[in-house]
Every structure is written in structure tokens, then in C-alpha cells.
């Protein structure tokens, strides 16, 4: 019997830990190419952000919208202490991420610590309290799972064969319009005329979520090693997923 792949929408979050309004949140409905952008008010959340509150709000929204793949731009776990790679996880070395996640409580640069702690705790809450599954390399053998997936938009631009979006501090409205048009041309995604830097970063990884939903292995590029639990119940390492155009 042929495998029956799950169906569902994809939600992508460009994480911000200081204010809910700073998150870029993009929704791609099942079978649709039209990208919708979600605001904090749509999630019924109020500042200051907490990992528990955000996990609950995201899950409730995903339940309503039939989301089966949730993409988060942030680390899911800490570095394996016995790893031969210093200061960071394997996936971060492969993709040259600006933030490096070390052993528990250790990051580079140090200013990234609040963001990284928030992200790891958000993954934890989604996994433990809301039954999301961390993406593993055998995802295509388990089509019934609801996956929470680590993304890295900067790398996604490259794996789509595009120049990366300029940094937010240097990105003009003309830049946003240009990169929006190019992304739409390459992926077929239908994007609104006006969107923020965070929203565009959330949108660029949507194709990998769509590929996971459809079971298209050739549309998914994985970096790193499968996440696993330490003896203390802490997630270590993990995979970052990026889209590949086929």
C-alpha cells in the first residue's frame, strides 16, 4: 500500500523574545500558495513574552488552522558536551549561524543568551506540553507526526539559489520589495505588496515546510544531527531544515 502523507498547513515564526509584535509569523494554508501574515493580536497574547504562553498560543492557532509543520527560527537544543566541535552545535557550524549555542547556558556572542534560552525553552514547551515532535532525519517514514522544525532563513535564501536578504538595519523598503518579488518568482508563493523584514524572513522558509507536509525529500536539506535527550532530559544538538528547489 502506498504511503498516505499527512496534510496540513505550515506556520513559520521568525522569533523575537522581547515583544510579541516583533515576531514575523507567516501562514501557508493547505494546498495554497497565498501567504498570510499573523499578528500578535491574532494569537491573543500579551507582553512580556514567555515560552509557556507563546507555545500555548501557537498550538491553539495551529489547531484552528490545521497546521502540521511549525517552523521556528531559533535553536532547539544545546551543544553535546562531548562534541569535537567547539562552542557550537554541528548544524550551526555547517550553516555558519551568527549565534553559537554551546553547552547549557553558554552562547556566543553572549548577547544572544536571552534569545537562545527563549527559543530552546519554546521548543521544550511545544514538545513536552503540546505533543509536537522535533524533526528527525527519518521524518519521511512517519507521516502522521506533527513536526516542530528549526529553520534558518539566512541559509534558506542561499539554498533557494538567491542572494540573502540584507540585514534589517540596512534593508530598505525597496530591498524588501525586490526580495519579495524574487522569492515569489522562484517559489510561486503569493506575497502581499507590503511586508516587514521579519515577515519576509518567516516566508522564505515556508517551502521546506510544504515539502515536509507533502513528503518530498528532494525539497528538504538537513544540517546537523538528530536531536536527542540527555540523561537530565535536556535536548542536545538538532537538525536545521532548509528548502531546496526541485
Image: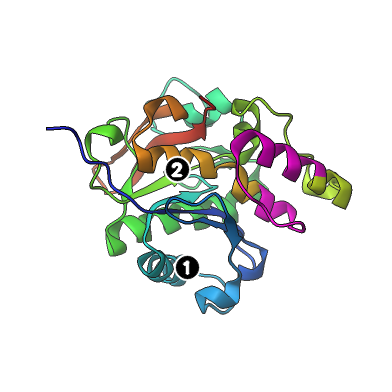
Residue at which label 1 appears: 54
Residue 99: x, y in percent? 61, 39
In-image side of 108 versus 77 (left or right): right
Question: Magenta stretch mostly in which secondary structure?
Answer: helix
Disc 2 packing (10 Å; few <14; some 14–19; many ≥20) = many
Q: Is residue 236 above or below residue 123?
A: above
- Name which residue lies at 44% across and 71% down: 57
Q: Nearer the viewer, residue 178 or 158?
A: 178
Label of residue 9 in the image: none
Q: Is residue 47 left or right of residue 81?
A: right
What range of the chain is rendered magenta? 178-200
Mark nearer the viewer, 2 or 1: 2
Please give the residue where the numbered disc 2 appears in the rendered image. Answer: 210
Q: Compared to 13, does 5 lie above or below?
A: above
Question: How is the structure coloured here?
Answer: rainbow
Residue 48 shows in the view? no
- Residue in view at x 65 percent, y 36 percent: 154
| Observer-nearest of 178 and 48 | 178
> Looking at the image, which residue is at 62% across and 59% down?
16
Does residue 195 show up magenta in the picture? yes
Q: Helix or strand or loop: what does disc 2 sit on?
A: helix
Residue 159 location (% of width, % of height): 59, 27
Position of residue 198 in the picture relative to residue 28 (left or right): right
Location of residue 27 in the rendering, given as x and y in whole percent from the top left corner: 52, 57
Answer with the quarter of the image where residue 209 lies.
top left
Vertical position of residue 183 compared to residue 24: above or below: above
Examine the structure image and report whether residue 37 is included in the region drawn in magenta.
no
Amino acid at each position: 500500500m502506498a504511503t498516505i502523507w499527512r496534510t496540513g498547513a505550515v506556520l513559520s515564526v521568525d522569533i523575537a523574545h522581547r515583544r510579541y509584535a516583533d515576531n514575523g509569523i507567516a501562514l501557508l494554508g493547505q494546498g495554497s500558495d497565498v501567504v498570510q501574515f499573523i499578528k500578535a493580536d491574532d494569537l491573543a497574547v500579551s507582553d512580556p513574552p514567555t515560552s509557556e504562553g507563546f507555545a500555548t498560543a501557537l498550538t491553539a492557532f495551529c489547531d484552528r488552522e490545521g497546521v502540521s509543520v511549525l517552523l521556528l527560527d531559533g535553536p532547539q537544543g544545546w551543544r553535546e558536551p562531548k562534541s569535537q566541535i567547539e562552542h557550537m552545535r554541528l548544524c550551526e557550524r555547517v550553516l555558519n549561524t551568527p549565534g553559537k549555542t554551546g553547552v547549557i547556558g553558554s552562547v556566543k556572542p553572549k548577547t544572544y543568551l536571552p534569545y537562545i534560552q527563549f527559543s530552546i525553552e519554546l521548543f521544550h514547551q511545544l514538545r513536552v506540553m503540546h505533543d509536537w515532535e522535533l524533526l528527525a532525519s527519518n521524518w519521511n517514514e512517519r507521516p502522521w507526526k506533527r513536526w516542530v522544525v528549526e529553520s534558518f532563513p539566512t541559509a534558506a535564501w542561499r539554498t533557494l539559489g538567491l542572494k540573502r536578504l540584507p540585514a534589517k538595519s540596512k534593508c530598505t523598503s525597496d530591498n524588501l520589495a525586490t526580495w519579495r518579488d524574487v522569492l515569489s518568482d522562484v517559489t510561486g508563493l503569493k506575497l502581499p505588496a507590503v511586508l516587514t523584514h521579519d515577515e519576509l524572513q518567516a516566508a522564505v522558509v515556508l517551502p521546506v515546510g510544504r515539502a515536509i507536509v507533502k513528503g518530498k525529500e528532494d525539497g528538504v536539506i538537513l544540517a546537523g544531527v538528530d536531536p536527542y535527550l540527555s540523561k537530565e532530559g535536556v535536548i542536545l544538538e538538532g537538525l536545521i531544515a532548509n528548502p531546496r528547489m526541485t
